[in-house]
Image (spheres, rainbow, N blue to C red):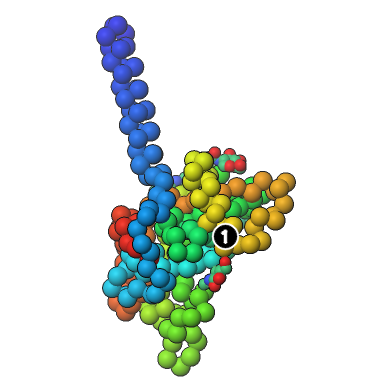
Amino acid sequence: MGHWSFVALMLGCCLSVVLSDNQSQQSNAIRLPGSQPFSKSTRPPFYDKARRARYIVHKANWTVIATFSTKPELVGRSFPAPASISDGPVGKSSGTPYFYLAAIDSIMHDVAKNPNVTLSFSEAAFSDIAECAVTSTSDPESPLCARLMLFGQLVNVTDPKETSFAKEALFSRHPLMPTWPKDHDFGFKKLIVTDVWILDFYGGGSSVSVDDYYNALP
Ligand SMILES: *[C@@H]1O[C@H](CO)[C@@H](O)[C@H](O)[C@H]1NC(C)=O
Ligand SMILES: *[C@@H]1O[C@H](CO)[C@@H](O)[C@H](O)[C@H]1NC(C)=O
Ligand SMILES: *[C@@H]1O[C@H](CO)[C@@H](O)[C@H](O)[C@H]1NC(C)=O
């Protein structure tokens, strides 16, 4: 190999490292709530799908995290485990789902093998949505009782500023969390949101772009 082709090879290698690093930083962007005013927790109309999605995520105290199971008897199967969630203290929504999970949690074992997870929400989890009540005119499966899925990767929160936001987000809404045993190696995790899907009206569900999701005020 000639001297110059070697130099070109080295340059190419470093350039691609820089590029892929930038890419991962972009998708892993930290989006803490800004100073915009947040509307009160009124339920946005069905046609404002990005805002309805933000409303659901902010209101939820728990969700279902579906991993690809690594349990020997269930390898590769969808494993939808409920977990507590917060995207920010009440009235301070970030849109990013944060979690406080133990290292021994099966979610963390699965995520070590495959970080791709899907979060599933239903407005039926809230007690005040009439369209979700089981009556002769409403039902959790009614299209007017919204369901939402967020797709992405579950990762450790590492940035110190984001870690303190995640802690405030979760501990302010889940008073039991600070008492959980230290020797279980609990840590703050977040979903890097790559896709959003919502069904909140007749006619089937639809995707919402991640930018629209983050730009919407809950
Ligand atoms: C995770 O999902 C992405 C698509 O978002 C895919 O490219 C990647 O291969 C998946 N990872 C694994 C380990 O399956
Ligand atoms: C995330 O944190 C856990 C527990 O502290 C650790 O075992 C794991 O290696 C971390 N994952 C990554 C990708 O750094
Ligand atoms: C979520 O938890 C808070 C307590 O932190 C409570 O005030 C609120 O009503 C709960 N929300 C729902 C939808 O259950």
Q: Which of 132 and 39 is in front in this view?
A: 39
Callout 1: CB less than 8 Å from ligand 3: yes
Above or below 106: residue 124: below
Q: Which residue is drawn at 40% across and 54% down?
A: 33
**Looking at numbered disc 1 in the image, what kind of residue is underneath it?**
Ser
Q: Where is residue 82 in the image (x, y as percent from the top left)?
A: 57, 63
Q: Is residue 15 left or right of residue 28?
A: left
Q: In this view, does 136 lie to the left or right of 15?
A: right
Q: Is residue 137 above or below residue 40?
A: below
Q: Quadrant of the N terminus?
A: top left
- Work out whether residue 78 can be spotted: no
- Total marks shown come to 1
Query: Which residue is rendered at x = 51% and y = 54% of the image?
Result: 98
Q: Nearer the viewer, residue 137 or 178?
A: 178
Q: Which residue is drawn at 47% across and 52% down?
A: 191
- Displayed quadrant of residue 91: bottom left
- In the rendered image, the quadrant that contains the C terminus is bottom left
- Secondary structure beneath dot 1 equals loop
Q: Mark 1 points at which residue?
A: 172
Q: Is residue 145 left or right of residue 73?
A: left
Q: Position of residue 36 (x, y in %)?
A: 35, 58
Give the left or right position of residue 81, taking residue 96 as reference.
right
